[in-house]
Amino acid sequence: MEAFSDGVIAILITIMVLEFNIPQGNDLAALVPILPLFLAYILSFVYLAIYWNNHHHLMQVTDHVDGRILWANMHLLFWLSLVPFTTAWMAETHFAMIPTALYGLILLLAALGYSFLVMAITAHGDANHLLRKAIGRDKKGKISLLIYVLAVALAAVHQWISLSLYALVAIIWLIPDRRIEKVLGH
C-alpha cells in the first residue's frame, strides 16, 4: 500500500510540472506569464510532499492492513489526484474565486480522507495501537479542517485570504510532526 501510494503521489507531482510551458523569450520578463502557475505549483507541491511524508510515518506504525484500510487509502488518493487539476485551473484563472474555493474544497476533502484512513487503521484494536497513542486527539488535524472550511467560505470575500489560509495549513504541517517518531522512540 505504501509503495502504491508513493507512486501515485510521484505521478501527481509529475503531472503538475508538465503544466509548465516553455517561456517565449530569453529574459526574466518571459517568466511573468507563468508566475501564477509557479506559485500554485509551489503550494500544491508542498501539500503533496506533506501528504507523502505523513503517509510514510503512518505506515511506520501500521501493523495490520485490511480491505477497509485499502479503500480508505484509495479515498485519500482520489482527492489528492484532483490537486493537479485544481492547481492548474486556479493558476490559469489567476486565482479566481470559484477555482480558489474548489482548490480549498479538494484540500479539505483530502484532509478528511486522511482522517478516515487514520480512523480505519486505528479501528484494529491492538494491531495498530501505536498510531492511536501517537495521534491522540489530533488537534493539528482538527484545526486544519476548521481552517480549510473557513478558507473555502472566505474565497467569496477575497481569494488571497483563502490562499493565505491554505499556506497557513501547509506551514502548520511543515513543522515536523514528531508524534509518531516519539512513539517509535526515534
Image (cartoon, rainbow, N blue to C red):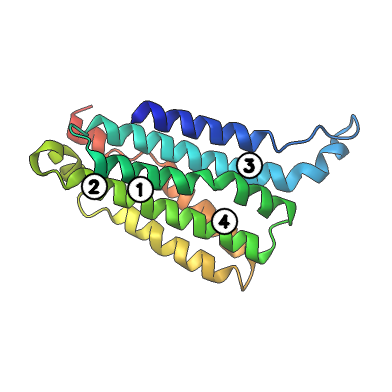
Q: Residue furthest left?
A: 126
Q: Are marks 1 and 4 in contact (CB under 8 Å)?
A: no
Q: Nearer the viewer, residue 40 or 112?
A: 112
Please tell me which of labels 4 and 2 falls first in the chain: 4
Quadrant placement of the C terminus? top left
Task: State which mark lies toward you, 2 or 3.
Answer: 2
Please tell me which of labels 3 and 4 falls first in the chain: 3
Q: Which mark is residue 103?
A: 4
Task: State which mark lies toward you, 1 or 3.
Answer: 1
Task: State which mark lies toward you, 2 or 1.
Answer: 2
Q: Are marks 2 and 3 in contact (CB under 8 Å)?
A: no
Q: Residue at x 51, y 30 (%)?
A: 10
Q: Amino acid at mark 4?
A: Tyr
Q: Residue at x 37, y 55 (%)?
A: 112
Q: Amino acid at mark 3?
A: Tyr
State how far apart marks 1 and 4 are (Cα): 17 Å
Q: Residue at x 25, y 33 (%)?
A: 181
Tell me if residue 131 comes above or below residue 141 in the rendering.
Answer: above
Quick one: SS at disc 4? helix
Tell me if residue 153 comes above or below residue 132 in the rendering.
Answer: below
Task: State which mark lies toward you, 3 or 4.
Answer: 4
Q: Are marks 1 and 3 in contact (CB under 8 Å)?
A: no
Please tell me which of labels 1 and 3 falls first in the chain: 3
Q: Which mark is residue 114?
A: 1
Q: Nearer the viewer, residue 95 or 32?
A: 95
Q: Position of residue 35 (x, y in %)?
A: 75, 44
Q: Which mark is residue 120?
A: 2
Please tell me which of labels 2 and 1 falls first in the chain: 1
Quick one: SS at disc 3? helix
Q: Position of residue 48 (x, y in %)?
A: 49, 39
Q: Position of residue 8 (x, y in %)?
A: 48, 33
Residue corresponding to mark 3: 41
